[in-house]
Image (cartoon, helix red, strand yellow):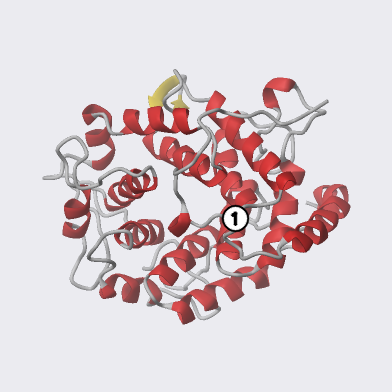
Amino acid sequence: MVVRLSRHRLLTLLCGVLTALTLVTPALSKPAQAVADRSDAAAGWLARQLVDGERFEVVFDGVAYPDPGLTLDAVFAFAAAGVADDPAARALAWVTRPDIRDGYLGDGTTEAYAGATAKLTLAVQVRGGDPTAVGGLDLVTRLRSLQAPDGRFTDRSAYGDYSNAFSQSFAILALARTAAGVPPTGGEWLAGTRCPDGGYPVLPDQATCVSDVDATALAVQALRVAGRAADATAGLDWLVSVQSTDGGFTNAAGTANANSTGLAAQALRDGGRPLAWARARGFLVGLQVGCAGAPADRGAVDFDGGTLDRDTLNRATTQAVLGLTGVGYPRLTAVGADPDAPTLPCR
């Protein structure tokens, strides 16, 4: 941690000042070219890592398994950067294949997973598709059917309910894009999980409420679209209060990393905190492989700035792209995205 702080402090401060000076237009405007180069390169690198140009996999004990969740994270990253539209289309086509889709969402009868259903619904919407007709499946109806009377979106499963703040937030973000909008109880339930310090926990059923950076970053975006501005503001204030001096954010293990910082940075810019976003973005730039790196690695964003960890590189880069652009989930769209996967401009 101390080594990273000394190595990146100057770069972070300079990036923060320069980026802040570019914010003369609203937070939702297109980033300056230097910002775009970094985010474009990260998304382009990510697109080139897709297995068979369509999916991500996770390896356990030497066996590769399909990873629809990470693949959807990449779809969001491509939309945020406005590039790699062709790979994004192939990735979503793969996730919505009936064999992959049903394994990810559950069969809808004995098994139905709220978080996965919400995430796929949002991805289809971001890419301009109809979530009520995905290979004969109405994702919106299924998602609404998973909401309990108290407002919480829950899993229907023989293996237990693993729904959490991410499930609830993605459900709200997806339903906000539908004609019927967000059920008021959905936002009320999420707001009710807030910890005394203003942040939000991953799991609501805790003896002691512990705020989490990742969960709070998603929750504040969901709460804003649910019309609960005060609850979102409390979460944004908490995020600013726990930001490290180098601009980064730590996970539950106390490690400053690209994943937590990427999500927090996205929430901060989307929530109107441009200076805090600029500092977080500077931290992310410090984790990105630049022109001095191997050509095949340029654009990737490392998890924590140590030895390049290829086991975490894909996931770290997906969430770092969200922070580099600062485009919030409510405003993600693939409209106008470049079809190609760019590289970092190096001479």
Q: Nearer the viewer, residue 112 or 127?
A: 127
Query: Is residue 11 rendered to the left or right of residue 96?
Result: right
Foreground pick, 1 / 214: 214
Q: What residue do we see at 57% from left, 72% from top?
A: 236
Question: Would you place residue 64 above or below residue 191 in this image?
Answer: above
Q: Is residue 230 visible?
A: yes
Who is closer to the viewer here, 97 or 126? 126
Residue tagged by mark 1?
A: 326
Which image quadrant is residue 33 in? top right
Q: Where is residue 14 drawn, in percent x and y? A: 85, 55
Q: Residue at x 53, y 34 (%)?
A: 338
From the viewer's perspective, tell me whether residue 287 is left or right of residue 18: left
**Picture quadrant of residue 241:** bottom right
Q: Where is residue 196 drawn, in percent x and y?
A: 51, 81
Vertical comparison of 149 with 246: above or below: below
What residue is at 47 percent from the left and 72 percent from the top? 209
Q: Report the number of numbered marks.
A: 1
Residue at the spot 39% in from the left edge and 31% down from the top edge: 89
> As shown in the figure, which amino acid type bears the numbered disc 1?
Gly
